Each structure stands twice: as C-alpha cells, then as structure tokens.
Image: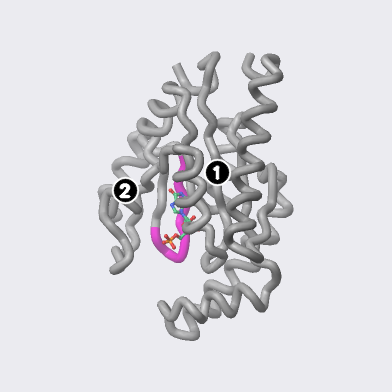
Amino acid sequence: MGPSDNPHPGLLLIISGPSGVGKTTITHRVRQRLGAVFSVSLTTRPMTGEDTDGIDYHFVDEARFKVQRDAGYLLEWAKVFGNYYGTPRRPVEDNLAQGKLVILEIDVEGAIQIKKNMPESFALFVEPPNEEALLHRLRRRQREDEQTIRGRFARAKHEITRARECGVYDAFIVNDDLDHAIDQAVQAIADELAQRRNSPAQQV
Ligand code: 5GP
C-alpha cells in the first residue's frame, strides 16, 4: 500500500529554494516547531565541515547511488551542481503511514517528480526578497570563490523562474526577515492541515 491509499495519511511537505536563501534554517525551525520528521537524502557530493553523515545527508559514492536509484529505492532524484541527490522512499512512506509530517528539502526538479506521483503533497518555495539580496547572501557565506558564487547565482535565478512557471508550488515565502518567514511557513502548513481535516472529501 502506498501513502496515497492510506485513509489517514500524514502530510508530505516539500521545501525548495535557491542556495543562499536561508531554506535550511527555515526547514530546521519549521521541523522543530511542528514536530516534523526530516527526510535524510542520499548525495554523492563531498561532505563539508558543516555536514554530519546520516543527519544532514547519507553520503555515498556514485556507484552506490545508482544501485539504490535503479532498484527503485528513491522516491525522486536529481543531479544538482554535478552531484546526485535523492530521497529514500522507505522512511518517507513509513512515516507518512504513521500520520507524521515529513519534510523533503529538495530542488525544483525533485519537487516536480514528487507532485506528479504524490499530488497530495504540499510544496513551499522560499524566495529571496530580490536578486541583490541573494547575491549578497551567497557572498556573505564565504564558502566559495567568486566564480562558484556566480554559478550558484545564475542557477538560483533560473530555479526561481522555473518554480514560478512549473505550477507545483502551493505557496511562495519571501525570506526578508527570518522569523517572519518561519512564521509564514508554519502558518501555511497549519492552514493546510486544518483545511484537510475539515474536508474529508480530500482524503478519499
Ligand atoms: P546542498 O548540497 O547545498 O545541501 O544542496 C544542493 C541542492 O540540492 C539544494 O537545492 C537542495 O534542496 C537539493 N537537494 C538536497 N537533497 C535533495 C534530494 O534528495 N533530491 C533533490 N531533488 N534535491 C535535493
């Protein structure tokens, strides 16, 4: 039985947004406030000093990633900045079956795949207030050289356009002020949950 057959499903929440927009902080705070479960993705990208294996990501090599993907163990996957990322299927389905709120922090291509297969999922896109603010934040992180920053900036602009055009996102949150953005995200999810509880027709 898949989660869509469950008469009392949890909520699958997708959070996307360009790098540098603050979406990881927002995701963690939303998770804490709503007691949600964070889906730990598989990735082939190298681990950085800020990552903990098994908590932020499961770090794997490309061969292992492809074995998992080809065996159907991933709900969705995408190649981002030359590295593979994917969502392990089993923990998501198990947690949803237990009625939990599960958060996927994934890119737009992954969100499109999820919405196609699980249209009952709820998708938020976190945006910067404007392009200058995004470029400023990418530089302030002091993680990468200028060429990499420019690459991320170009991809971010493309991702925002794609997010607006693809019709997959239920709400757009502008991260002008972090606390306000978190409040808005929590409110959007609470509204959605209340609406689902009050309209049993949606659960059929
Ligand atoms: P980072 O390497 O900076 O943590 O993530 C790079 C991008 O990959 C971000 O946009 C992030 O949301 C996305 N991402 C992380 N995990 C997944 C995943 O499992 N699937 C997809 N499609 N994208 C992911």
- Above or below for 190 versus 106: above
Which disc number belongs to residue 177?
none
Residue toward you, 50 or 61: 50
Image quarter hosting the N terminus: top left
Q: For the residue marked with disc 1, what is the amino acid?
A: Ile
Q: Does the residue labelled 2 lie within 8 Å of ligand 1?
A: no
Question: Residue at label 2?
Answer: 65
Which disc number belongs to residue 14?
1
Q: Which residue is pictured at 28% across the width and 54% down the height? A: 59
**With 49 as the anchor, is 16 left or right in this view?**
right
- Above or below for 99 versus 143: above
Q: For the residue marked with disc 2, what is the amino acid?
A: Phe
* Location of residue 65 in the rendering, given as x and y in whole percent from the top left corner: 31, 48
Q: How crowded is mark 2: few (under 14 residues within 10 Å), some or many (20 or more)?
A: many
Which mark sits nearer the N-terminus, 2 or 1?
1
Q: What element carries label 2?
A: helix
Residue 12 falls within the magenta-colored stretch: no
